[in-house]
Amino acid sequence: MGIFDSITRGLGSLRPVSDAELEDEREALRQRYVSSGDVNESSKLYDELHRYDKEMTRRASEAYARENPNPPEPRHREHGWYLPNDD
């Protein structure tokens, strides 16, 4: 599996990276973005940050789905969500 991970990583996939490595790489990227003085470089780093954020959100959503396989049904109040609870 190691060679396939290195190939997908070389092609730009973030999936084979562990969560800790992903957070560390994102923080280093964020620091480069903040300290960047060039607009073009900042734009590229901004897009890269969003790519990391999307992967982190995907992983968090998958973890939540594994922990909560049957989410509760939404509950609606008797008279609607926009009315106060003062009865």
Image: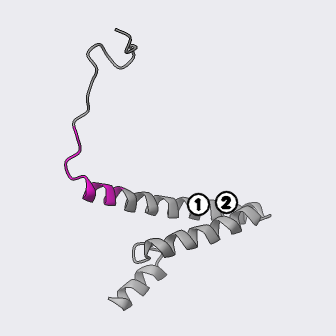
Where residue 32 appears, x then y in whole percent? 70, 69
Where does label 2 land, which residue?
A: 43
Residue designated by label 1 = 47
Examine the structure image and report whether residue 62 is included in the region drawn in magenta.
yes
Colouring rule applied to residues: one colour
Q: Quadrant of the N terminus?
A: bottom left
Q: Which amino acid type corresponds to the residue marked 2 in the rendered image? A: Ser
User: How far across and down, in percent of the image, does residue 25 sit?
Assistant: 57, 73
Q: Which residue is found at the position 61% from the left and 68% from the top?
A: 27
Element under disc 1: helix
| Position of 86 relative to 58 (above/below) | above
| Residue furthest out toward the left | 70
Answer yes or no: do the residues labelled 2 and 1 have beta carbons within 8 Å?
Answer: yes
**Three-letter amino acid code of the residue under disc 1:** Asp
Picture residue at 37% right of the left edge, 90% below the top:
2
Q: Is residue 83 above or below residue 28?
A: above
